[in-house]
Image (tube, coloured by chain):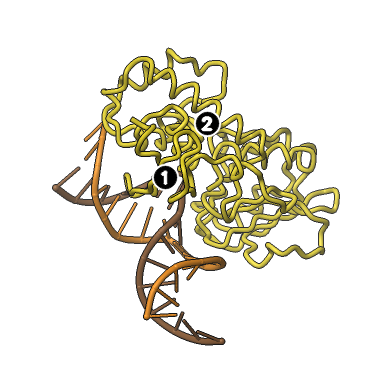
Chain colours: A yellow, B orange, C brown
Amino acid sequence: MPELPEVETVVRSLYADVVGRVFVAIMAYWPRQIAPLSPQEFASRLTGRYVQSLHRRGKYIVFDLDAGALLIHLKMTGRLYVVPKGVSHPDDRWLRAVFEMDDGHELRFSDPRRFGRLLLVDLAEEVTGQLGPEPLSEDFTLEIFRTRLTARRGTIKPLLLDQHFVAGIGNIYADEALWSAGIDPRRKVDTLKPEEVESLYIALRAVLLSGIEHQGASVNWYRKPDGTKGEQQDHFNVYDRTGKPCSRCGTVIQKISLGQRGTHYCPVCQK
DNA sequence: CGGACAACCTGGCGGC
DNA sequence: TGCCGCCAGGTTGTCC
């Protein structure tokens, strides 16, 4: 669920609380989430580390440390929040890791489904180097998008979800961007006309920016670090709107399965 | 390279 | 009210 806008919101929210801090004690409770390191290795290597900066790459939250980098992927149900040490929080019910900091606060990672991942590496690029371009960066031009698109075959929606193709897009923003561009999610990439590629490029960036502006979409699990919901769900045109009228043409929004993913679209205005 | 599918997990919800 | 079964979705790995 957390996609680029949600992760960006989390990073912006946590920034002031963690940058400049030193981790003084670490606990990790679910070994699979920090593999291949053991909880002991994970803790010992992070203890004493200084957080130089915090940023997002794709759906990864990247902590730049004075030695190495900590990457956190929230997957579907991961949450991060900062609270004073010793103070309980409702999400502690699913607490999976705690990072005690030198100012008396704790960064906590909660994740009911335990799909999230905490990776400690020497260089962030060991992980993020596999990702496609950042869709909101200046480097990601229409021509870059067009070139990358024409190098691929297959169906457009699953391609948008491929993190090697473009980083940060998930099920929500893929559906929303395709609706905005008026493109049927089942279209084969090589049938897209040049003007459709341009529409999709514009739509992708627009829906991601809208998502950031509204601090993410809280369909069910996503929450901002302060515990409140984002507001992007109030601006959905197709996602989670099955059976409701298309805001552009009034046709009932349909839901199908495409690449094993729920896919919402308007059968009339998406061609 | 693309597509299908299982695996990883649990909470929430619809149906009975 | 309670139980059952399914769905949700990010990513990886496997197989064809």
Q: Tell whether A71 sits left or right of A144.
A: right
Q: Is residue A36 above or below residue A10?
A: below
Q: Circle 1 sits in a helix, a strand or a loop, which is it?
A: loop
Q: Circle 2 sits in a helix, a strand or a loop, which is it?
A: helix
Q: Position of residue A211 (x, y in %)?
A: 60, 36
The residue shown at (66%, 52%) is A44
The residue shown at (50%, 58%) is A32
The subunit letter for the residue under badge 2 reads A
* 3D distance between C-alphas at marks 2 and 1: 40 Å
Query: For residue A253, which numbered disc appears in the image?
Result: 1
Position of the C terminus of chain A, as image quadrant, is top left
Q: Position of residue A92 (x, y in %)?
A: 69, 64
The reply to whether label 2 and label 1 mark residues of one chain is yes
Q: Position of residue A192 (x, y in %)?
A: 31, 22
Are circles 2 and 1 on residues that touch, CB within 8 Å? no
Report the front residue among A268 and A234: A268
- Mark 2 or mark 1, which has the lower sequence index? 2
Q: Position of residue A74 (x, y in %)?
A: 56, 49
Q: Is residue A266 above or below residue A102?
A: above
Query: Which residue position holds label 2?
Result: A125
The subunit letter for the residue under badge 1 reads A
Report the front residue among A66 and A228: A228
